[in-house]
Amino acid sequence: MDYKSYLSNMSQEILGLDKDLGQLGEILSEDSISNLKVYKKNYMNHVFNILSGDFPALKKYLGENNFYFFARKYLIEVGIQSPSIAELSRAFKVYLVGLHSLHEDDLIEDIVKIDLLWSQSYPQEIEVSSGALEFWQELISGDKSEKVINLDVLVRIVLINYKGEQAFKVLT
Amino acid sequence: MKKQKIEGIGLSLRFPHFNEILKFNHNVPWFEVIVDDFLVDGPHWDKLTQLRNKKPIAMHSIGMNIGGVDPWDLNYLKKLKQLYNKFQPEWVSDHLCWSAHNGKFHHDLLPIPRTNAGLENAIDRINYLQSYFGRPLVVENVTQYIDYKQADYTEVEFINKILEKTDCYLLLDITNMIINHKNRNQDYKLFLNELQMDRIKQFHLAGGIEDNGLWIDTHTEDVKNEDITALKLIYEMGSRVPGVIERDNNLPLFSVMKEEVRRVSGASVGL
């Protein structure tokens, strides 16, 4: 088998996650085939950890099981297409917002925007529904907000450095 | 930027520790920066500038895909080069592994088949990278949880051939070396006896776990005493290069990591 085929077969098997494609009997020793689960688990866990870190409010909003479901769905349908870890989260945001199953939830897009601004300072300025930021803070802190969400009114938010700590600022 | 020789045991820079590190009221002599965390601009660049002004750094990446066959991601390489120029690391490193294929990235360190084709591919790609960056590369040995049926070289033969043919340096991950040998019931001292020790630029040490009889390099635990014993042996064999403690998850406070630095540094006492 040529070198490129080695990598192709290994890659397909690992990216297939739970699926056992049975392609590696020619390449790997028998013990090694069962140890492949380490790489499969690493792949899923690595992505889940990155996305959990970059989307803390979304994870709370969806719940851990649902968040994991969408992260796994993203990996199977799209995969990681950049060596940049930051790009992974940005691509996941685009994917989530485009998912038909989440279209009915108007808050998802606002939550992921605020999450990404907080975790990556990206982009520099975002526009979200009035009350969405307070809802995001409620998700993060657990403290109830009195603010009512108004999807028809948009506010612009940026990230600032306030007394050495990062903070949101709502632009008037 | 601080011109200072890298010596002793340092730490892999972790963002939750950044503010504590920048107080500079500690004795951690140097830091290894995961350059992939800095590929996009942000407040962390300012923090790294502050760090670099006071401490020497090395830059370590995970995405060069040395063992892969995909065309080079020139945007990625260009970004790495920009960061090297901006932050002036003392050396730059990545892994002897493949991490992407057919445009899909694994973000993992997959072992290179130790065949003649695997060797030639790795040599060609390391030579290209060294020419592109205009500096020598340091390459790290990785854990190998699998064995390919075909192997034209042992692990140490493979590494030595690469060092010889490319003039690159080795980042000897002591934990990876020990895990690879423990998982195969082999003695790592045989590996060390054959290794080109004069090409070692740096060490890594980390803490892993055992899962159903298989040791895994999770970077989640304290450095094991047997790893410190191995480090002491390597010092006695004549290699006194700097090292870094890696901790990715289950991250304790910076004060705990400072204590780890002190504990691991004890390997050099009396030598």
Image: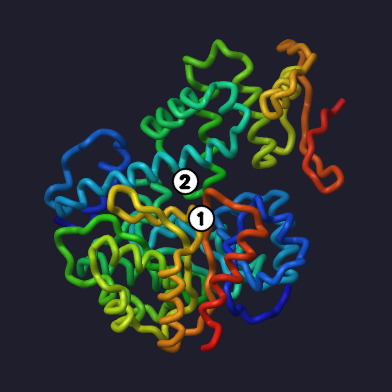
> What is the number of the mark on residue B132?
none
Q: Chain of mark 2?
A: A
Q: Distance between the Cα atoms at labels 2 and 1?
A: 9 Å
Q: Quadrant of the C terminus of chain A?
A: top right
Q: Residue at x 69, y 41 (%)?
A: A121
Residue B63 percent location from the top left of the image: 45, 56
Amino acid under label 1?
Tyr
> What is the number of the mark on residue B76?
1
**Residue B89 placement, left or right of A17:** right
Q: Label 2's element?
A: loop
**Residue A18 placement, left or right of A130:** left
Amino acid under label 2?
Ser
Q: Quadrant of the N terminus of chain A?
A: bottom left
Residue A135 percent location from the top left of the image: 71, 20
Q: Residue at x 49, y 68 (%)?
A: B93
Q: Which residue is mark 2?
A: A82
